[in-house]
Image (cartoon, coloured by chain):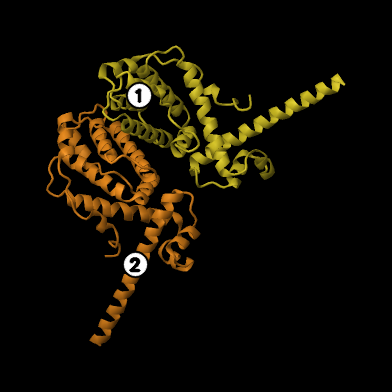
Chain colours: A yellow, B orange
Amino acid sequence: MQKRQRRVDHRTRVGQERSARTETRILEAAMGVFADKGPDGPKIEDFVEAAGVSRGTFYNYFDSVEELLAATSEWTTRELIESIDSLLEGVEGPLLRFGLGLRLFFVRAQADPVWCRFVARVWKIGGLEFPTRDLEDGARLGVFRTPYPAVARDLVFGGVREALLRIGTEWTPADYAERMTELCLRALGADSRQVAAVMKHPLPSAPLEASRRGVKGD
Amino acid sequence: MQKRQRRVDHRTRVGQERSARTETRILEAAMGVFADKGPDGPKIEDFVEAAGVSRGTFYNYFDSVEELLAATSEWTTRELIESIDSLLEGVEGPLLRFGLGLRLFFVRAQADPVWCRFVARVWKIGGLEFPTRDLEDGARLGVFRTPYPAVARDLVFGGVREALLRIGTEWTPADYAERMTELCLRALGADSRQVAAVMKHPLPSAPLEASRRGVKGD
C-alpha cells in the first residue's frame, strides 16, 4: 500500500515536472512570437508551431492568446524583477537603488534582443509595470527634484521603452544603455554629482541570465 | 467637340473627387481601427466594415493592410507637420520652434484621442518620424546642451509617445501636456530660463483641426 502510494507520488511528480516543462516551452516560444508579431497579431497556430506542441496540448495550458500574453508578461517580468531585487539586497538609498536597477535591467536587455522587443511591444499589458517604490521614496526624500514627478516618470518610462526598441532591433553603441540611464536619472531631477556616483558604482554581478530559464513550475 | 471635351473633363473631375472622398473615408476609418486594434491586429474585413465600403472598393485603393497602414500614417502625419510648419512660419530659433511645435502637437493630441492612440501605436511605422531639424540646429548652436544628443532624442521621443498613450486612453490633468513639453525641453539640455520663455510664449493659433479632414486628393 505504501509502495503503491510512493509510486503514485512519483508518477504525479514526474507528471508535474513534465507539465511545468511544457508550460515553460510554450511561454518561451510565445515570447519570441509576441516579440516578432506584437501583442495583437499572432494566432494560436503561431504558438503551437513555434513551441512544437499540438493544439490540444496548448489548450491544456492556455485558453486564448490574451491569457497566454498575460502569462508570458508575468513570467518574463517576475523573474527579472526578482533577480534584480536580489542583486540589490543591501543597497541603500532610492537613487542608487533605482539607478543600479535600471543599469541591471539594461544588461539583461542587451543580452537578449528577443526579450527586449517583447517587453517594448507589450509594455503596460499584463502587469509589465516599472517598479516605482524607489522613485516614490526618492521624491519624498528630495533626491529626485523634478517639479512634476508623475510626468517625469512617464518621460522616463517612455524613454526606457524607446531604448528597448532600439536595442532590440538595431546595433547600438556599447555605452548607449549607460547613457540612457544617466539621462533618465537627470530627467527625474537627480543632482549631477549624485548621478555620476551611481554611474561609477560597480554593478552587483550575478548570473542574471541563468535565472530566467526554468524558474516556472518550481 | 469642345463641349464634349468639357463634359469629359467634368465627368473625370467628378469621378476624381468621388474617388478622393472614398479614399479619405477609408483612411479615416482605418485610423480608428488601427488605434483600437494596433498595427498588427486588424484584418481587411475590419476596415471594410468601419468604412462602409465593399471589399471590391477597398481593393481599388489598397492592396493590403500593410499598404493601408503606411498610407494612413503618411496621411495623418503629413497634414499635421504641414499645419504646424505653417503656424511656425516666421518663428526664429530652434528652441522656440521645437518647443512651440511640441506644444502645438499636443494641442492636436488632446483634441483627438483616436489620433493620439493611432500615432502612439504605429509610431516608427510608415514615416511617423519626429521632425529633427530644429533639434539638430539647436545642438549645433549650443541651445541644447545635453552630453548625448542622440540618446536624449530617444528619451524625448519615448516620452512623447508615452504621453500620447496616456492622453489617448485616460483622463489627464489640463496641464499634463505642457508639463511634458517642459520636461522634454529640459531633458534635451535647454536652459531653465529659456524653457520658461518658450512655455510662456503665446501659441500661434489657427484652426489646426480644420486642416485634417479633406486635404487628401487636392
Residue at 37% in and 51% down: B114
Element assignment for label 2? helix
Q: Quadrant of the C terminus of chain A?
A: top right
Q: Is residue A201 visible?
A: yes
Return the residue at label 2: B21
A56, above or below A172, in the image = below
CA separation in Å, label 1 and label 2: 50 Å
Q: Quadrant of residue A171?
A: top left
Q: Residues within 10 Å of mark 2 (few under 14, many from 20)?
A: some
- Residue B101 picture location, percent across and down: 22, 44
Write down the quadrant of residue B59 in the picture: bottom left
Give the chain of mark 2.
B
- Name which residue type carries label 1: Glu
Q: Residue at x 16, y 38 (%)?
A: B200
In which chain is the residue bearing label 1? A
The kind of secondary structure element at disc 1 is helix
Compared with B138, A90 (above or below) is above
Q: Which residue is mark 1?
A: A178
- Residue B214: % across, % down: 29, 63
Q: Is residue B52 above or below residue A91?
A: below
x, y (%) of residue B51? Answer: 42, 63
Dots 1, 2 in contact, CB < 8 A: no
- Outermost residue to the right: A1
Q: Position of residue B171 (x, y in %)?
A: 36, 42
- In the depicted structure, whether residue B206 falls above or below residue A21: below
